Image: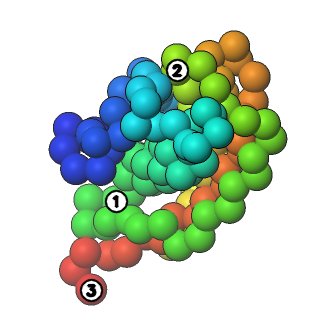
Amino acid sequence: MPTRGFQKTLGIELDEISPECITAHIDIETRHINSVGAVHGGILMSLADSLGAMGALQNLGATQRTATLESKTNFVRPCAGARVTAECRPLHLGRQTSVWQTVVRDENGKICAYVWQTQIHIDAKA
């Protein structure tokens, strides 16, 4: 990922992926902008959701899959510029759930949003 589907449509480019940290960016195009000229909040939330799911995948057992159970976003400031970056780290890694925090920044490194999400870990055999 993100070689297909929604993540590809968003234009997510992975920079680093490990069980402890996932970083990525999106080069902003007109399709990412809202009616007042900032990056649409849905883009920021979708970027964070994608990274949290990727993080969970890095920590699952061989027979498990994951889905987002809950997500919360605090928008700190409008996000503008040519690129947004995101860094996602685990806050909790359990057997049945994991909790992730993603910090989204603008091209100047200013924080635009904090996103917390809970991923459920599902046994694929169930």
- The Cα–Cα distance between marks 3 and 2, rounded to whole angstroms, is 41 Å
Q: Quadrant of residue 29?
A: top left
Q: Which residue is mark 2?
A: 83
- Which circle's residue, 3 or 2, is located before the other in the chain? 2
Percent coordinates x, y for residue 92 in the rendering? 65, 56
Q: Nearer the viewer, residue 42 or 126?
A: 42
| Residue in view at x 22 percent, y 80 percent | 125
Disc 3 crowd, CA 10 A, few/some/many (<14, 14-19, 20+)? few
Mark 2: which secondary structure? Answer: strand
Please state which amino acid type lies under the numbered disc 3: Ala
Disc 1 crowd, CA 10 A, few/some/many (<14, 14-19, 20+)? few
- Which circle's residue, 1 or 2, is located before the other in the chain? 1
* Horizontal arrangement in the rendering, residue 6 relative to residue 107 (left or right): left
Mark linked to residue 126: 3
Give the answer, above or below, for where 77 lies relative to 16. below
Mark 1: which secondary structure? Answer: loop
| Residue in view at x 37 percent, y 74 percent | 122
* Horizontal arrangement in the rendering, residue 41 relative to residue 54 (left or right): right
Which residue in the rendered view is the most extreme toward the bottom?
126
Q: Nearer the viewer, residue 60 or 31?
A: 31
* Horizontal arrangement in the rendering, residue 17 relative to residue 96 (left or right): left
- The Cα–Cα distance between marks 3 and 1, rounded to whole angstroms, is 14 Å
Percent coordinates x, y for residue 103 in the rendering? 67, 37
Q: Nearer the viewer, residue 8 or 69?
A: 8
Q: Quadrant of the N terminus?
A: top left
- The Cα–Cα distance between marks 1 and 2, rounded to whole angstroms, is 34 Å
> Does the rendering let one see residue 67?
yes
Q: Which residue is mark 1?
A: 61
